[in-house]
Amino acid sequence: MENNQDKKIFFIPGWMKSLKYYNQESGLDVWLDSKEFDRKLESGILVGHSLGTNVALNKYSAGIEKIILVNPVITKKNFVGVLWAWIKFKFDEENSSDKNVPLIKMLTTLPVVSRLAKKNYEEIISKIPKENIIVLRGKNDNYLCDQSCADFFKKFQINVLEIEEAGHNWSDVFDQEVKRIINS
């Protein structure tokens, strides 16, 4: 992710995606290397997509300048809810698999997905200054970051930007909006 102000930016991919899939060089490839979950981040900007937003929220520390959450998946309270929403999403939106992430990683990361789905995000978000969180939601995301997810953030007075013509999958409009936010 380009930035004109030499800010440290850490990108966290969605489930079963790699940094390479997003054309990112700096970030946490958590779905390829489980050690990345333990990596400490003390400063910079976190950008997470999909289940990567869950990781970003759990990585927050006082030195983090901003967290940009793109289509967060945090209102599904259990693993079955997340899995069912993901299956419906896969049938609705164009499949965009990442050839860099071996299929076996789907099985090995399921326990992590389950733990992330069970976290108390109300408590986590209440500890982060609201001005440090920005949510981007694809207006056509009907399964993973649906209206109830947007409403969840709005009840905390967190800015939710609805992106027209976007669903759940990462797209150029998300990339452009994230760059605009980082460089503003």
Image: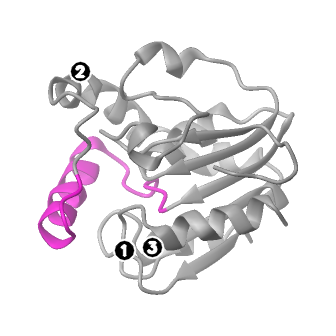
Q: Residues within 10 Å of mark 1 (few under 14, many from 20)?
A: many
Which disc number belongs to residue 108? 2
Q: Earlier in the sequence, mark 2 or mark 1?
A: 2
- Left or right: where 169 falls relative to 86: right
Q: Which residue is mark 1?
A: 167
Q: Which residue is at the far bottom?
A: 164
Q: Calculate the distance from the C-alpha at mark 2 to the C-alpha at mark 1.
A: 27 Å
Q: Earlier in the sequence, mark 1 or mark 3?
A: 3
Magenta span covers which residues? 71-96
Position of residue 92 measured from the top left corner of the image (x, y, whole percent): 17, 72
| Amino acid type of the residue tagged 1 in the rendering | Gly
Q: Nearer the viewer, residue 11 or 138?
A: 11
Position of residue 23 measured from the top left corner of the image (x, y, whole percent): 48, 46
Circle 1: element type: loop
Which disc number belongs to residue 148? 3
- Left or right: where 174 falls relative to 102: right
Position of residue 146 measured from the top left corner of the image (x, y, whole percent): 39, 73
